[in-house]
Amino acid sequence: MALLVMLSTLSFTVEKHFCGDTLVDAALFTEVKGCGMEMPSTTKKSCCKDEIDLVKGQDELKYSFNDFDLDQQQFIATFFYAYIDLFEGLPEQVIPFKDYSPPNLFYDRQVLHDVFII
């Protein structure tokens, strides 16, 4: 979802350099490199031309709570309140015997030393 929002708000330019009808160079985010055949505009008409395409992203993502009508505000407030209650802390668990030491363990000595009566 975050990637979708980022891509929908991204603006960029695509620059293309044509020499006659042939595409010589295209660049995204940077300037194009010319083919070296550009002429000053005062002498002759140049066969080269540059095209710049601007792809504008969305810039209307900022909403205020006051932009919503009363029903929408009530829904948002109720949803937020119910969602926050999900993360309310649990009461601390009471362990009644935490101050007592555990009983001594009794080992089965026959199994411990692998000594069996046959």
Image (spheres, rainbow, N blue to C red):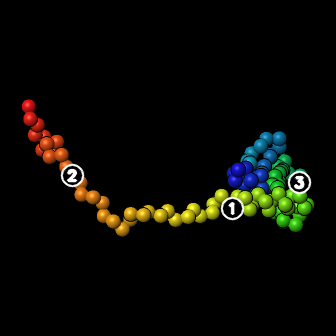
Residue on which disc 2 sits:
106
* Lower position in the chain sequence, tag 1 or tag 3: 3
- Number of residues whose C-alpha sits closer than 10 Å to that of mark 3, classed few (under 14), some (14–19) or many (20 or more): few
Q: Is residue 103 visible?
A: yes
Q: Position of residue 20 (x, y in %)?
A: 83, 43
Q: Secondary structure at mark 2?
A: loop
Q: Which amino acid type is marked by label 3?
A: Lys
Q: How many marks?
A: 3
Which dot, 2 or 3, sits closer to the camera? 2
* Lower position in the chain sequence, tag 2 or tag 3: 3
Q: CA distance from mark 2 to mark 3?
A: 106 Å
Q: Secondary structure at mark 1?
A: helix
* Lower position in the chain sequence, tag 2 or tag 1: 1
Q: CA distance from mark 2 to mark 1?
A: 50 Å
Q: Residue at x 30, y 60 (%)?
A: 102
Q: CA distance from mark 1 to mark 3?
A: 71 Å
Position of 113 with respect to 32 (left or right) is left
Q: Position of residue 41 (x, y in %)?
A: 87, 58
Extreme residue toward the top, this view: 118
